[in-house]
Amino acid sequence: MNAPHVHSNLDIDWSTEAIVDRRNRFYSATQRKFVPYKDPLILKRGKGQYVWDEKDRKYIDLLGMNLCISVGHAHPQVVKAATEQLAELTHCTTMFYHPVPAQYAEELVATMPAGHDWVVHFTNSGAEAIDLALLMARSHTGNIDMLALASSYHGATFGAQSVTGIAGFRHPVPQLGGVTFVAEPNQYRGIHGEGLQPYLDEVERAIASSTSGGLAGMIIEPVQGYGGIVPMPPGYIAGAVERVRAAGGLCIIDEVQSGVARTGDAFWAFESHGIVPDIVVVAKGVGNGIPLGAVIAKRDVAESMADKFLFHTYGANPVACAAGRAVLKVIKEERLRENARDVGAVLKGRLNDMKERFPIIGDIRGRGLMLAIELVKDGATKEPAPEETLAIFEETRRNGLVASRSGPYRNVIRMCPPLCLAMSDVEDVVDRFEKSFAAFSGQ
Ligand code: PMP
């Protein structure tokens, strides 16, 4: 089925200079700042795992528009579901009843561990959902103190910023009180080195020394995204959550990047960690690019806020929820979780081969289609190589890849393509990386 090709009569100026000029003149500093490349990349259209710029140059999209594109750009089933709903009833506030968000809530609940009573609160974005999760945990427990991980990213609102452990995203204003950061159990460059115990000991120490002893909860990304693809090692989440629950707190899992079949092992990344969270935050890939977020929480946790109003005007928007329903269906029908697992494993293997040839590559990590290359000046000292990363990153663009640079030292190349990246794309991706690394190292 093809997307309907109906064009508006809006006058769109696609000239490169005009786009750049208008953006510079009319976007605020904060909206202009976050750009990956020296020269602007203008994107015109996307299909599946590919995007095209305004000059019709094709790229393999290894970023999926910051992981928002899960099942593929312009997926016909998502386009159809959303456009049909758009034409019929574009919005229906939750003051009124509509089947689409309600059925979507049921379908989201079905993705969660059985044997628990889950409910959904829809938002428009990840950060809104994070704020709600923090509020819910504090309302339910009656406690204030919250643990978060260093090098985490949870969003840009006041609440989400307060639990974000990267200075560049924290603005110089008073943040929410009661947040204590503990070291992220980064097995490549964490401050306690490899292993679990020292990181779990730190959780215990932090509860004993930096909180009242009674916790609201702890918030964790199963794989830190902007932190540079830092997967929580097996046993860490379970160990941390055990200590947090002993102090009366809840387990909040941020699946905004790692969820929706991304890691290939399970639909939600937390499922591979042997825990059942109390609150799960989802966004990005659930909507395949349509603004959509949600908190999925145990009923008794959500119920503790029943006395107050809390709504997001566009939360449960039927167009977004129609897209969300189509995403769930497509992931199942096209076996995209299995695809992420299999293609990701082969790609990771090939990147590991590349590591042997380029000493600047310090680490290859991640699971499924959430992978990273970390670049270091020296393999022994692991000194980060941000300038070299930038140079190679610029090369990857010239070679037709859209990836991303992340991590607190900006020395990590992050790959989170649409889940439909095909096995037949792997050689292409690796060739383009090889060329980019070779151009930099003069090989
Ligand atoms: N959590 C994580 C892990 C994220 O990566 C992001 C966005 N990058 C957010 C929360 C916030 O989502 P949003 O930008 O939709 O507010």
Image: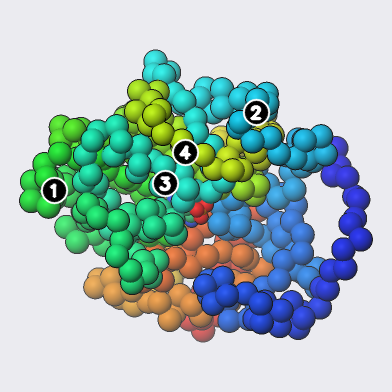
Identified by mark 3, the residue type is Ile
> Which label lies toward us, 2 or 3?
2
N-term mark: 4 or 2: 2
Quadrant where the N terminus sits is top right
N-term mark: 4 or 1: 1
Residue 310 badge = 4
- Circle 2 is placed at which residue position? 96
- Asked if the residues shown at circle 4 and circle 2 are in contact, with their CB atoms under 8 angstroms apart, the answer is no
Element marked by disc 3: helix
- Circle 3 is placed at which residue position? 130
Identified by mark 4, the residue type is Leu
* Residue 136 vertical position relative to residue 369 in the rendered view, above or below: above
Q: CA distance from mark 4 to mark 2?
A: 15 Å
- Asked if the residues shown at circle 3 and circle 4 are in contact, with their CB atoms under 8 angstroms apart, the answer is no
Look at 46% across and 44% down and name the residue there. Answer: 129
Which residue occupies the foreground of this view, 41 or 292? 292
Q: CA distance from mark 1 to mark 3?
A: 21 Å
